[in-house]
Image (cartoon, grey):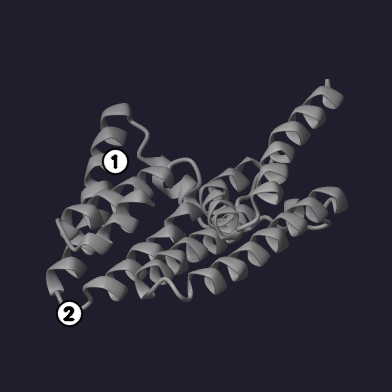
Amino acid sequence: MRRLLSIKSLKNIKLKIFDAGLWICVSSIFYEWALLYLLLVVAAIYIYDPKNIRNWLVFLSVGVCFFMIMYSILVILNETSFIKTHYNFTVNFNLIFPIKWWSSLKLSLYGLFNIALAFSTFIYLGKAGMGKVIIMRLVALSFLIGLVVNFLVTSENTNAVMITFFPSVIFIVNYLESIKRTKLLELILISSIVLPIIVFVTKL
């Protein structure tokens, strides 16, 4: 994500595209649906430098490079079946439905909370120029893709939601920057430190 956001400088764009795309492909080893984050790379290319055909060729070369490296390693380990068994992109609805109401409620509140922060951030940055607004659009897209990946990952745990923490933190920081009243800002910051500690202690 950091590499994609740094494309705004328009320096070493092809290197940043390759770096970001390759790391996304590597992350797909853990969650196959993480490949959806390649849409973020496509969006960044389209926003910043869509007319340069070399950027699109670099994007395509990422998949070829990753496949060649991974397949070579799997051949050495005699585990070539991993590609077929891991990258099946199936959705296990038996694990998704019925949704546990408490986990679903927490995820829904988390999503709504971040959507509200995103709207607040876009309103606040509306006067700051298109540069920051474009960055926040990429961050918002990253958050939405993270929620989709968390939903599609066929796992009984909810660890995949951690991939949405980075854009969520950006939303929170931008919202805090929009608060002009010092006492209110201090109260929010103190609460953000004290409340997690209280929750952690009560769970012990």
Q: CA distance from mark 1 to mark 2?
A: 31 Å
Res 90 seen here: no
In the rendered image, residue 129, in percent from the top left (x then y), is placed at: 38, 74
Res 14 seen here: yes
Q: Which residue is mark 1?
A: 70
In the rendered image, residue 53, in percent from the top left (x then y), is placed at: 14, 74
Compare residues 158 and 121 and report the one nearer the observer. 121
Q: Residues within 10 Å of mark 1 (few under 14, many from 20)?
A: some
Q: Residues within 10 Å of mark 2 (few under 14, many from 20)?
A: few
Compare residues 167 and 61 and report the one nearer the observer. 167
Q: Is residue 84 left or right of residue 179?
A: left
SS at circle 1: helix
Quadrant of the rendered structure where residue 38 is?
bottom left
Residue positioned 26% across, 60% down in the render:
7
SS at circle 2: loop
Residue positioned 74% across, 51% down in the render:
95
Q: Which residue is mark 2?
A: 51
Looking at this view, name the residue that lies furthest to the front.
Answer: 182
Looking at this view, name the residue that lies furthest to the bottom.
Answer: 51
Residue positioned 70% across, 45% down in the render:
188
Residue positioned 58% across, 43% down in the render:
162
Q: Amino acid at mark 2?
A: Lys
Q: Amino acid at mark 1?
A: Met
Q: Is residue 164 above or below residue 196?
A: below
Compare residues 87 and 28 and report the one nearer the observer. 28
Q: Which of the image's four quarters has the C terminus? A: top right
